[in-house]
Image (cartoon, helix red, strand yellow):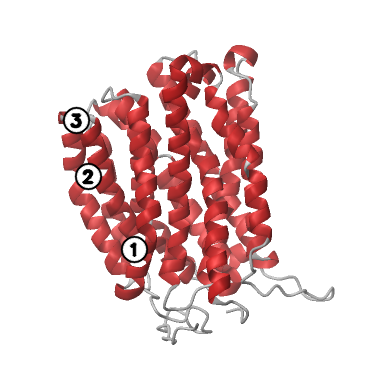
Amino acid sequence: MTPSITPISRRRTIVATTIGNALEFFDFTVYGFLALVIGKLFFPTFDSYGQLLLTVATFGVGFIMRPLGGIVIGAYADRAGRKKAMTLTIFLMALGCAMIAVAPTYAQIGVAAPVLIVLARLLQGFSAGGEVGASTTLLVEHATPANRGYLASWQFASQGLGILLGAAVVGGLSFALGPQGMESWGWRVPFVLGMLIAPVGMYIRRHLEESLDVEVEPACAAPRRSSLSEVCGEHGKTVLSAILAITGGTAAAYVVTFYMPTYAVRQLGLPPTVALFGAALTGLLSFALSPLVGLLSDRVGRKPLIVWGRVALMLLIYPGFLWLNMSPTPAVLFTVVGLLSIALVVQTVPAITMLPEMFPKHVRASGMSLVYSVGVSVFGGFSPFVSTWLVNATGSKLAPAWYLFAMTLVSFIGLLWLKDFTGKDIDDAAAHRPDVEPSSRTARA
């Protein structure tokens, strides 16, 4: 722990990280809320199902680059510091936003239009892959053993804030401009906003207090072992277990938050604005409840909350989808989304805290970034695509519920193999040896 970290600097870190991360997730996720409009403009040669499938696939394409971004930016964060890595990610995310904002449509330049969108999503995915690892690691390293869950919870809270802003902006524009206005020019506004607010995030992050003591290596020093090889070589079992453990949470997060608006419009016939405000509710609950769940995880432990949250999610998934299909009204949508979101927060906050706790400090950002980006890429980003395909392939509107149930069940396997570091010293020299139980440490001021 860096000695200069004080309660005041922790609060400053929470504010700065939350604002910056919220801006990043606004930029990255707003694409998902515009799936139907973008499908018409960039994939007009396909039928409505083909447009939707290609648009959610393009949303998923952004996740293909997340493991690479996690590896590259995570290693950079472990060498140059968390603050520099986080400043880089927000610049790259804004650049991807700018590319989408000015991209000509298919009617203007033909097949080159969707190619530009894919390239922009790849760039945003690369950025997002490094963002979560660096920012969560920074929060964890500013914490004491007694409040790590609370500080790390602001990572997920900031994601909720970004989602809330994205859904509110798209929903407000859709209500004000109508379908014609959105297809004409309104869809570009959120990406322009994302591009313009990036300098604010970069300025805030430059004034963060670094949590890693960056050492200058002498010119004659032997080459350091790469972070990736050390993480995979010495912590391979932890990496695989952690990836498996987060599958259920990431699949649920992206179905509830990003697929639900499309599902509500296409399958249930609800107005787009109602569906988007349902997504905004998810963001609001994530932002409001995450710090409370973080505090609770510091008291009762990470694993118990994850188990309770996942059991609740499994019990709610099928009845929720069934009720929504039997009574597709705004009130039912908000109720189902709200209940699923609460269960999601209860399991995700302690899970996202556990990930950086699994690795020693000199490879912590790399390990966290690799696990999170791979798990989210494979099981999260393509969840809207898989759900869309399953509904069409099976003819059942309840197919996404069974998919989430199965993914949540599988994720329990990885959880069994992970240590719970609640209240323990994660910087102890022997803490991450498989044969040693981490020691407790009295909380620091």
Q: Which mark is residue 264?
A: none
Q: Secondary structure at mark 1?
A: helix
Describe the element under mark 2 as helix, strand or loop. Answer: helix
Amino acid found under the numbered disc labelled 1? Val
Q: Position of residue 368 (x, y in %)?
A: 51, 62
Q: Nearer the viewer, residue 146 or 61?
A: 146
Residue annotated with mark 3:
325
Residue 264 visible at all: yes
In the rendered structure, which disc, 3 or 2, sits on the residue that comes first in sequence?
A: 2
Disc marking residue 293: 1
Q: Amino acid at mark 3?
A: Asn
Q: Gap in Å between the C-alphas at discs 3 and 1?
A: 31 Å
Is the residue 44 above or below the residue 408 in the image?
above
**Residue at position x 84%, y 73% in the image:** 219
User: In the drawing, does residue 327 fall left or right of residue 75?
Assistant: left
What residue is rendered at 20% in x and 33% in y? Answer: 324
> Mark 3 falls on what kind of element?
helix
Label 3 neighbour load within 10 Å: few <14, some 14-19, many 20+? some
Q: Does the rendering let one see residue 348?
A: no
Q: CA distance from mark 3 to mark 2?
A: 12 Å
Type of the residue with mark 2: Ile
95 sits to left or right of 160? right
- Find residue 348 and report its horizontal and vertical position in percent: 36, 57
Q: Which residue is mark 2?
A: 317
Picture quarter with the N terminus = bottom right
| 245 or 291: nearer the viewer | 291
Q: Earlier in the sequence, mark 1 or mark 2?
A: 1
